Image (tube, rainbow, N blue to C red):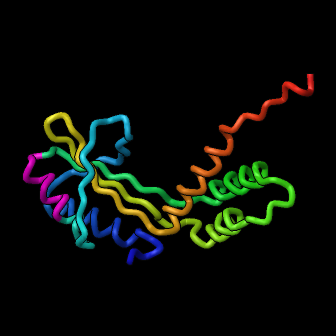
């Protein structure tokens, strides 16, 4: 089970990377880049990932984090309220979004990466609340794409 704040894990990662004599570059690897996702069931699998980077003679490891901001929740709540239908009894998405306020200022997602032979190798870890936040963002994006046919009004 993941903690609800990955800040201490981030600190451990920074120390471990430095302890292996490697440099760290703050940067996020996007989905547009050819990637291989590192899958490991062991909670300390990220250490194996860093050791693989060192074995591959990677000049650095990329590191990215997401800290939940109050403004992120405010925007999400506004969009959920705008897209909810009057009298909609299913307000679980809205309740979940409001609950996220408890996680403001916490690190919910970490990504490590290194390049080798034209491919980025990625290690990702996220908290449960961050996964739910991403689900809600997807709900808002999906609903925002629905177009209504107003041709009867003309």
Residue 89, placed above or below residue 134: below
- Magenta segment includes 51: yes
**Residue 30 x, y percent position in the rendering:** 38, 40
Give me the residue at 9% from left, 46% from top.
Answer: 57
Quarter residue 44 falls in: bottom left
**Residue 143 x, y percent position in the rendering:** 67, 45
Give me the residue at 7% from left, 53% from top.
Answer: 55
Q: Specify the farthest residue to the top.
A: 154
- Taking depth in this image into account, of 137 and 67 the one nearest to the observer is 137
- Taking depth in this image into account, of 58 and 94 the one nearest to the observer is 94
Instruction: From the viewer's perspective, tell me whether residue 92 is left or right of residue 113.
Output: right
Quarter residue 51 falls in: bottom left
Instruction: From the viewer's perspective, tell me whether residue 116 is left or right of residue 78.
Output: left
Instruction: From the viewer's perspective, tell me whether residue 55 is left or right of residue 105.
Output: left
- Tell how many labels: 0
Instruction: From the viewer's perspective, tell me whether residue 49 is left or right of residue 75.
Output: left
Which residue range is magenta in the image? 48-57
- Magenta segment includes 25: no
Q: Specify the farthest residue to the right.
A: 153
The main secondary structure of the magenta stretch is helix
**Residue 52 x, y percent position in the rendering:** 13, 55
Give me the residue at 54% from left, 63% from top.
Answer: 132
Quarter residue 46 falls in: bottom left
**Residue 83 x, y percent position in the rendering:** 75, 49
Give me the residue at 75% from left, 52% from top.
Answer: 78
Q: Quadrant of the N terminus?
A: bottom left
- Taking depth in this image into account, of 143 and 54 the one nearest to the observer is 143
Q: Quadrant of the C terminus?
A: top right
């Amino acid at each position: 089970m993941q903690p609800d704040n990955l800040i201490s894990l981030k600190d451990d990662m920074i120390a471990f990377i430095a302890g292996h004599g490697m440099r760290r570059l703050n940067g996020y690897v996007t989905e547009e880049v050819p990637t291989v996702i590192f899958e490991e069931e062991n909670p300390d699998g990220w250490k194996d990932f860093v050791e693989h980077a060192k074995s591959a003679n990677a000049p650095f490891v990329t590191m990215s984090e997401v800290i939940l901001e109050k403004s992120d929740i405010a925007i999400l709540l506004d969009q959920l309220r705008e897209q909810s239908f009057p009298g909609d009894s299913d307000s679980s998405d809205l309740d979940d979004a409001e609950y996220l306020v408890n996680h403001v200022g916490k690190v919910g997602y970490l990504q490590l990466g290194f390049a080798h032979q034209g491919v980025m190798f990625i290690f990702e870890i996220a908290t449960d609340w961050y996964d739910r936040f991403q689900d809600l963002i997807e709900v808002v994006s999906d609903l925002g794409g629905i177009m209504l046919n107003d041709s009867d009004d003309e």
